[in-house]
Image (spheres, helix red, strand yellow):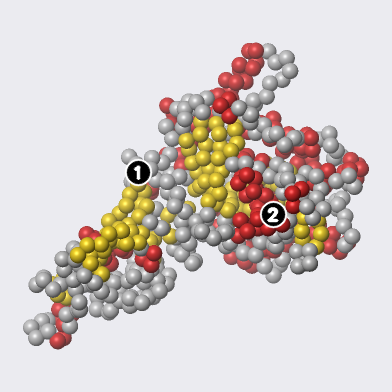
Amino acid sequence: MASYYPMKCPYCLKKHTNATVRFNLTNATVISERDAKRAIDSYVDAEADSGGRDAQSANEWDDGAGDTQFIEGNADWDSDDDGGDFSGGGPDSRGADKRTAYSTGVRRKDLPTSGYFTFTELKEIFGMDNVKADLKTVLALPALTSEEYLGELLVGVTITLIEGDKEVEKLMRRRYCDCADDRRLSESSGSIPSYVILLMGSSDSGKTVFLSSLYHELSRKSKYCFPPSPDASRAIASLWLSVLSEGTEETDIEKITDDLFEDGILPFSTFSMTNEPLTMEVTIKFNRTGLINKALLYLRDVPGEFFTNRDRQEELVRITNQFPKFDGFMITFDPLTFDEGVFPTEDREKDRLQRKQVNQFRQVVIRSIAPTMTNNMISQPTAAIITKGDMFFNRHFVNVLKNKGISYAMPLMTTSQYQSFDKPYFDEVDFGARKVLSCLSENISELIGAHFCNAFFSMVSALSRNPVDMHIGDDGRRRVSTPTAINPWHVADPMLRLLMRLHIIPPLDETNARSAAGEPNDERMARTFRNRNIINDWGAKYCTGGSTVNLV
């Protein structure tokens, strides 16, 4: 039997079924017109009816062809209504009665032309015969859905009505959530699984710059081979991450990225929890089978002030009920906030305040976020990211870091731009980042260890591994002196591993593709066999085609 995926709203995280998604009458598109067989010009005034009908006639009207049609309720519908906030059993939460027209091909003139309605409400308003569902067959994976989503996916609604002397068919294909501002759901919602990731951290921890660099990387280098190989045909699979935009205008993240990479302008702090998320469609193709799978990925950015400014923390508390519903987290940590303060600036007071921010962030996680989770433990996959990694390669700090036990000999520092994406590679990255934190920030190590049971560590530089020169422009904005010097370092690592932990792509962080010098042939074959089993076992559960598909 066909089933579809939950339609997840990236703003309120509600999961919609066919019965709860809504359609907007305002943007209904005319798809066909033809001469109407019948038309209604006015209602029958029951009190003026010379036939002297009883009180029931107040709920009747004449369709112009000698047939009497029945309407529920007496009050007129306000055809100029702006749509408002519609929910519950009736189309208008402000008290207007539901209107039902049971005729075929005939429409009352006072029916609404705006507002958001479910499919059921549209049938009650316009008549069952005049509202038709546009359905799509989706064979959803049992591991990612439930019986609540059985049947074909509702992707659009067609309404037949009379306008003037024409019978008009109108189509609505945009679906909406019933949360604030009637947020539009992605066109891919329901057709592929959806995941919402929250990006958070203290103020000035590099979240927005990291997000713009990630966007830039995904736009520029949209294809990844697993394992990495110059010859794509020798890879197990190829991965594409394409950035989606619902509108024709540039999104906030597109504007920020253009400013940064074209003009060197660094972004302001995140200003709103409800800003437009970075929306990506993930596509993976397996070379052996030709199988293609997709997923919808949303990245949300929460203002750091919610964690570090006591005047703003009430805003975070207000939305803490969302935290258990996120599919994963990315947390950024700024080296300037580390306890040891090994990266001093000329402003000592600013240094002190920055180091205080990690403790404030920690307190918010402990008091506001962890209590919303089972056993105070955050079980969602979490990427703990050390940002501004270029600081660890700055020659001014080399000796200071060496005295703290951090040197270029560490695997994290020597990892090249060429990534492996297998267990040894990610273990080296994770070990290196944990080593940095154990030497420089016990607060962060303790926080992640105490409240995150599915976390891994990375280090990135959103601008470059090599330090870049910056200055304050005439407009007061921070700028990179030479934008062409921007070369993001390892910004895709935490995202790719998060995709593995979310079962969107194969768990290559559990495999070992590396061969040691002089490795015996039987050991190489055994290692290859283990890798194949890991990937195929994953494919049987999370890939279309089920257990009959061997991906490698």
Amino acid on which the number 1 mark rests in the picture = Thr
Q: Circle 2 sits on which residue?
A: 262
Assess disc 2: are there few (<14), some (14-19) or many (≥20) residues with their C-alpha within 10 Å of its C-alpha: few
Q: Is residue 370 visible?
A: no
Rendered view: 163 above or below 369: below
Q: Position of residue 48 (x, y in %)?
A: 14, 87
In which quadrant of the rendered view does residue 414 lie?
top right
Could you tell me the amino acid type at mark 2?
Glu
**Which quarter of the rendering shows the N terminus?**
top left
Q: Which residue is mark 1?
A: 137
**Callout 1 secondary element:** loop
Nearest to viewer (mark 1 / mark 2): 2
Q: Is residue 415 above or below residue 62?
A: above
Q: Is residue 480 visible?
A: yes
Residue 238 horizontal/vertical position (percent): 55, 34
Q: How many neighbours does mark 1 have within 10 angstroms: few (below 14), some (14-19), or many (20 or more)?
A: some
Horizontal placement of 51 versus 318: left or right? left
Alpha-carbon distance for marks 1 and 2? 43 Å
Q: From the top left corner, tell me how far across and down residue 416 is, in percent.
A: 75, 35
**Total marks drawn?**
2
